[in-house]
Amino acid sequence: MQKVLIIGATSAIAEAVARRYAARAAALYLVGRRAERIEAIAADLQVRGAKQVDIGVLDVNDLAGHAQLLDQAEAALGRIDVALIAHGTLPDQAACDASVELSLREFATNGTATIALAAALAQRLQPGTTLAVISSVAGDRGRASNYLYGSAKAAVTAFLSGLGQRLRPRGINVLNIKPGFVDTPMTASFRKGALWASPDRIADGIIKAIQGRRAVAYLPGFWWAIMFIIKSIPEFVFRRIKL
């Protein structure tokens, strides 16, 4: 029986992942900011076949509360086979441009809090386990439309690259998950097109990447080619492009 910790479990992608583990009779520890929503998801997962579902409430920006939350998760699960960090917000870039305070708050949620949780989990995981973190293709290059969000994800990406290199000799795999456009409540106001994917499609890719002990997973896979091209554009040209 796999034992899975999911932080940010109320996100559409994380919930889709949790349903897949529930179908495999896994034991789950779900963490979110809203107790009522977490409780509803937990009840649904038990119906779907989860062997055990426990919950914890955490504001990820409460860095001092991370250790206690992880202690509770370990006590409930006994061990952690897979830890998935999936929390995040999608900042309004124009609002961030107008407010340094908002910029730093959004960076803390999408960057600092994620790094802090990954660092704390790295001290607790055992050989054969996986630390999976949902980052974004936005972290591959800063774009005018969302560079605050992208810079936070770039920090996460660089951190996970180094952490994965450090933990590999211990048999712990670090997986950096880079979704492209995903049709979730967080992107409800966005115009959708051919490049958009459902949370279920992303969740399938996450499960496959965890099983394959991959280091990086662009989801869907065609985003690797798209971002390769975008990263290859010279800076003096890139600054003249509207993205």
Image: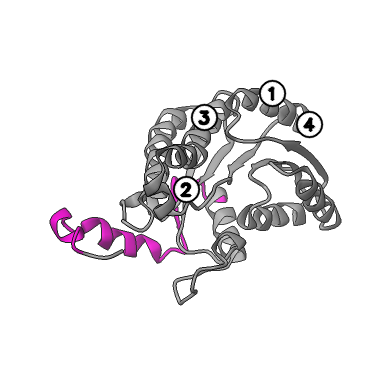
Q: Residue 45: x percent and y percent?
A: 80, 53
Residue 135's label in the rendered image is 2
Q: Residue furthest bottom?
A: 194
Q: Residue 89: x percent and y percent?
A: 54, 49
Residue 53 position (above or below residue 228): above
**Circle 2 crowding by C-alpha within 10 Å: few under 14, some 14–19, many from 20:** many
Dot 4: what SS? helix
Q: Which residue is mark 1?
A: 68
The N terminus sits in image quarter: top right
Residue 116's label in the rendered image is 3
Q: Residue 24: x percent and y percent?
A: 75, 53
Q: Which residues are magenta?
A: 211-240
Q: Quadrant of residue 201?
A: bottom right
Distance from the alpha carbon under mark 3 to that under mark 1: 13 Å
Dot 1: what SS? helix
Q: Is residue 23 left or right of residue 173?
A: right
